[in-house]
Image (spheres, coloured by chain):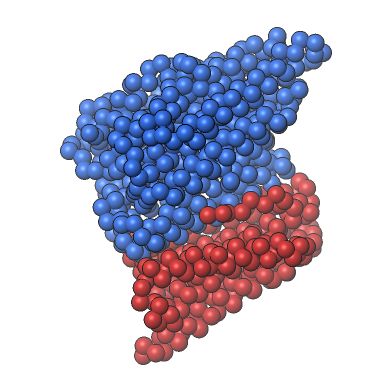
Chain colours: A blue, B red
Amino acid sequence: MIWRFGLVDSTFDPLMTTHLALAATLALPLLLGLLALLFPPKRAWPVALASVPVLASGLVLLAAVEQVQLLRWQWEIVGVTVSLRLNGLSVLLLLMSQWIGFAAALYTPGHMRLTSVGPLGFWLWPLMGALISALSLIWLATDLLTLYIALELMGLAAVGMLLLSGKATALLAGMRYLLLALVGSLAYLLGVALILGHWGQLDLQGLAGVVEPGPVAWIAAALVGGGLALKAALFPLHGWLSPVHGNAWTPVSVLHAALVIKASLFILLQLWSILLPDTFYAPHVIAWLGMLAIVWGGLLAWRTDSLKTLVASSTVAQLGYLMVAFPLLLGPDIAQLPRALAWDGFWLQLIGHAFAKAAMFMAAGNLILATGESTLKGLAGSSRRLPLSLLVFGVASITLMGLPPSAGFTAKWLLLQAMVMSQQWWAVAALLIGTLLSAAYIFRVFRYSFDETAPRHHYQPLAPGMDLIALALAFIAIVLGLLAHFPLALMNGGGV
Amino acid sequence: MIASFDAIETLLAIGLTIAALACLFDRHLVRASCFFVVFAIAMTLAWWLLGAPWLAAAELLLGVVLTGLCFFYALGIFSPDASPALRRDELHEPWGRAVARLILALGWFVMVGAAIRYVIAEMVYSPTEHPLLLAGIVIIACALGAFALHRHLLRRLLAFNILGSGVFMLLAGLAGTTATAQALIVVGLCIAWLGSMLGALLIRQLVHLEGVEALGCDDEPKEKAT
């Protein structure tokens, strides 16, 4: 597991262009965000133009990783060691966050024109920039201090963004999220304190060499895991998720559901693979909770009346698929092949879900904006007036339901194969039930929207690019399923 | 010399615990905020005593001045027309729930205590040798209980800050005041300040929009269950 996260020594030193690309990746989003606060963009094209260097830096890093597989950086700043690594997995996740961030940024000017933004509205830009910078740092960082800084920066930026709509319900939901996120990070810090006190270092690669199973490792893993599970909205701790999305702006929901939650999950898996290698109970507890999450999230999404709650609850269920794969990744007595398959399926599911959920939140936001209604019943008759938004919703739900040829299908296929090989039949059952439930709640949306007898009412016209951006994201999720061998080869390039 | 040093440390630990308890469970919110400032000053002294002057400076600036100001701002001390209802909080909790929260806090107490028993094995034989560490554990347990018990948003924010200080104290006690530990604590202090500032702004905005009743009704609690 350790080499899969790139926590080994690298053979090559990074080149000068790679250094520059790294600096651009980490700093440019924040700087561009601050620039946009001073000169708020009114159209999408300045945003697109400004994002080019960030996207280019991501592609330069991709090219570098394709050449040498693993790059490491290490600095010593006043006695504190900061270390970063870049391997196939982290570059994939980096590209994912850059492109989804780019899509959300492109979407924002149109959204701002159509909704009445208050005087605080333009603070969205610097917060968005800080969020993308922090996410990039999370995918790269390999010491617990840098991870802590990036995690907190991301958390605070996310809370700030969720509050911008300024309604009282949003503020209450945001306040609860803020308090829980802060307490979650203190649990993480307490776990880090135990690790630092017992093993005297924070570098993940060094820790992987010295950690041995025992009460300290278990308690530290429990503390870190509890804090991160709270931030990642893993099943019993997901209560804050739906209210937070209910009132947030569409681009904010997109970034939050697609990226912020995944970052905590990434850190959780990475730290547990160091602290709890080959343990039985902890990954199995997560997997059982994951099965409950699949069923409970599916039922919540099926029974709800609000479109945004439906999309948010489906996130809980989709995270359940990832949780179910934990015993395959961390558990004992798993053969090489099923573990490799589960690893591939896990990340493909995570990336596919990120793109599909981003597209789905955009489509839901477009539907709500155009109809002016946020309930499912309010969608009645929208099939005739808003075919494109519904098409996006449909294309995104192909991935969420796991129908071929989407990334969701390929990922589930890989996970199923791994589960059958290691004879985890309960996980197979959970996956199948989840698919049925997601079909149930998604077709419920279409049942309402294809209601032709509904009275016509006024529809707000949307800005031209808003549906197209969402459509592009949904198609990326499909294409990832068809061309899955590219990301998988990139991820597996770093080792055996 | 060593004995007198220990006496100072013990006194400080007791003072910290008392200030934390007063801050967590005082009904008058202004007074509770004052106790928070006292607590933060005691933390500053503790860092000084532990041989971390830079940390003491950071605590003085971030903890005492900036975070303290956040609470008084949230209470509306600086705006003349703030309603007095914001200044007091009554608990209307059913007993069963309060007991459940107490058990939660005790559970944490036991878990963290067990973890420390493994990290610092010699502490079993001389538990009074690290009074600040002990104070940290007690403060964490109390603050967690208070965070779970209170519904008033400002009191939860206070509880979070006390909890944070307890965690920093524990971190310093476990890992010593090495550069890495100090860096972690300074980052934690910055985060706690930013979080408190965001929370204070939110509370003012909520009072502005909904009135003071909105602060007490943080229903549908979702607690940590590690």
Residue A433, how many percent across, how many down?
57, 29
Which residue is at 57% across, 38% downward? Answer: A293
Q: Nearer the viewer, residue A391 or A414?
A: A414
Q: Is residue A89 visible?
A: no
Dividing the image into 4 quarters, which one contains the N terminus of chain A? Answer: top left
Quarter of the view holding residue A243: top right
Which residue is at 31% across, 57% downward? Answer: A212
Total number of numbered labels? 0
Q: Is residue B13 visible?
A: yes
Q: Nearer the viewer, residue B157 or B143?
A: B143
Residue A199, how many percent across, how many down?
31, 61
Dividing the image into 4 quarters, which one contains the C terminus of chain A? Answer: top left
Which residue is at 57% across, 35% downward? Answer: A294
Residue A472 vs A426, above or below: the answer is above
Which residue is at 60% across, 62% downward? Answer: B104
Q: Nearer the viewer, residue A84 or A327?
A: A327
Left or right of B104: which side holds A209?
A: left
Residue A33, how many percent across, how many down?
49, 35
